Image: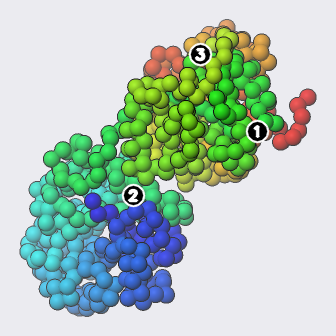
Amino acid sequence: MKTSIATVSLSGSLTAKLAAIAEAGFDGIEIFEQDFLASDFTPAEVGRMVRDHGLEITLFQPFRDFEGLPEPHRSRALARAERKFDLMNQLGTDLMLVCSTVHPAAIGGIDRMARDFRDLGDLGARHGIRVGFEALCWGRFVNDHRDAWEVVRRADHPNVGLILDSFHTLARRIDPASIRAIPGDRIFFVQLADAPAIDMDLLYWSRHYRNMPGEGDLDVTSFMQAVAATGYAGPLSLEIFNDQFRSGLPRMVAKDGHRSLIALMDQVRRVEPAAATDLPRFPAPAPVERIEYIEFATSAAEAPALETLLSSLGFAAGGRHVSKPVTVWRQGGVNVLVNSDPTGFAHSAYVTHGTTVSEIALMVPDARAAYQRATALLARPLVQETPPGQLAIPAIRGVSGNVIRLLDATSDLAGIWQVDFRATPAQAGAGITGIDHIGQTMAYDEMLSWSLFYTSIFDAQKAPMVDVVDPDGLVRSRAVRSGGLRVTLNGADARHTLAGRFIEDSFGASVQHVAFASDDLFATAAALAERGFATLRIGANYYDDIQARFGLDQGFVDRMQAASIMYDEDEGGQFFQLYSEPRADGFFLEIVQRQGNYAGYGAPNAPFRIAAQKRAARPAGMPRH
């Protein structure tokens, strides 16, 4: 599989883009003319730079407003094309993209446009150049790949072919199955992009909101299935116009892009087995069974405060690591590790972020298969020396650098608690039965990276994006679920929001909150109160509102208010939430109860919870009265 990406997809100078594209593992680039013109390099120098990075120029683009022009515009367009062919010869590339015209002087007519392309093909042949015709979804006369193909078919020239772009097809809701009738050798190039489902002007949507395959809502998999069925064997390239990407880190965007192409073609070969793909074999995605443990990295000085908090939640010390200062705290099948090791990864995480969730261990059907898939999809492995007699647990790095461990119940990894820990008796808790979800907070421009990370590596589904109103700005939130793993991804731009302050105060830590599960939150709340758990107090106005909104019994609402329990419901069931007061850095805990098939995370309650947390917050170092 030859992969490519348009230089316009990334931020930075041309040299920075080339370095990021090469590092991400692409084979080539589409050179966007503006990137070349904005540089101070000659065409020959650019060609050498590209080749020095181990890349090739797969496409030169765009050539606009060519077909269907009356004289003298037609002659000028052909002369302009010849100048570009000379430039391409110096760059060292042989394929140019011609996008369908929007020129006000253009005249319609398939045969007229076919003659134009036949003449362009003759001109290209004299320079060793091929041209590909792409239907812009906002094109004046040609805005459908079927019409572009008819122009190419009638031109009947070996140097004239079709260029397909998933956005232009899917944005117009054209059935991609129509591509299957096109001969694969007449498709010269394929560009791929996804996008969120937004009802807006097609040009504006395309120029600002495209994203990587799998990050949006378009059915790029069906599009690529149809392309693969034609026998097309050329490059798969990303052409992404996105304001967020063009201001983001080029290396992160490039890596996400390459990951998205691998994941896409893996999906295609699994749903279209007859399609020929040369992608290396690796295991299929599998759902996560549960979160087996979370680990806090801390210091010997700060560990007692963390352990006091766990004790107030009903956790009890249930064992200690055989060789490290790591204690496991247990309750109802939940394992929380407190790691105060002054060396290794946990110490680095503590030094960088303070006391923080540094590791999450996921129980999966086959840990080594999941690890193989993750690394094939460009996840960074964490390689650590394992002392004799202890388990070598597969581990990968998340987008922000935290660690995800992979465990299973069918290999030696099932013995983690017997091999790596010395167990001690643990007392009964406060009714916590599991980990319902974790909340990860990141800069908004990292949200798509995290979403792609989870949905490509695991069998996972993403929920629609929702806006969470903080008194000091907007936070965007998206839930991702894979079996027993639920994650809420919260992206913040505004630095004064609770999420923004957490990113700043913890120097980019990822997990801002952990939500535990209870089968009876009222009983759990009573047990926590007896243990001195610092519950977040919710104002009376909130309870007046939910009583009116849901028509709840007054006595029931009074019980919730007395315990500071929040409430939501949907068509599937009911949801109860109780929060801790936030730490100085913004980290907090949550305990929830789901009834029926409630599928959400209490998003309508978030503005009121955030307001209460801001009221309860104390600056670091300020004592409580």
Which residue is drawn at the image coordinates 34% and 53% (left, top)?
Answer: 262
Where's residue 400, x and y in %?
58, 49
Quarter placement of the C terminus:
top right
The answer to whether one can see residue 124 in this image is yes
Disc nearer the start of the sequence (3/2): 2
Q: How far separated are the C-alphas under marks 3 and 2?
A: 41 Å
Contact (CB < 8 A) between labels 3 and 2? no
Q: Residue furthest right?
A: 625
The amino acid marked with disc number 2 is His
Which residue is drawn at the image coordinates 14% and 71% (left, top)?
Answer: 152
Of discs 1 and 3, which sits in the foreground?
1
The quarter holding residue 530 reads top right
Q: Nearer the viewer, residue 294 or 591?
A: 294
343 is higher (above) or lower (below) than 592: below
State left or right for residue 349 relative to residue 484: right
Q: Give the SS element for disc 3.
A: loop
Disc nearer the start of the sequence (1/3): 1
State left or right for residue 562 relative to residue 206: right
Q: Give the SS element for disc 1.
A: loop
Please rate how many residues cluster around mark 1, counting C-alpha atoms within 10 Å: few if below 14, some from 14 to 19, many from 20.
many
What residue would you read off at disc 2?
A: 258
What residue would you read off at disc 1?
A: 299
Q: How far separated are the C-alphas under marks 1 and 3?
A: 26 Å
Q: How far separated are the C-alphas under marks 1 and 2?
A: 38 Å
Which residue is drawn at the image coordinates 55% and 32% (left, top)?
Answer: 389
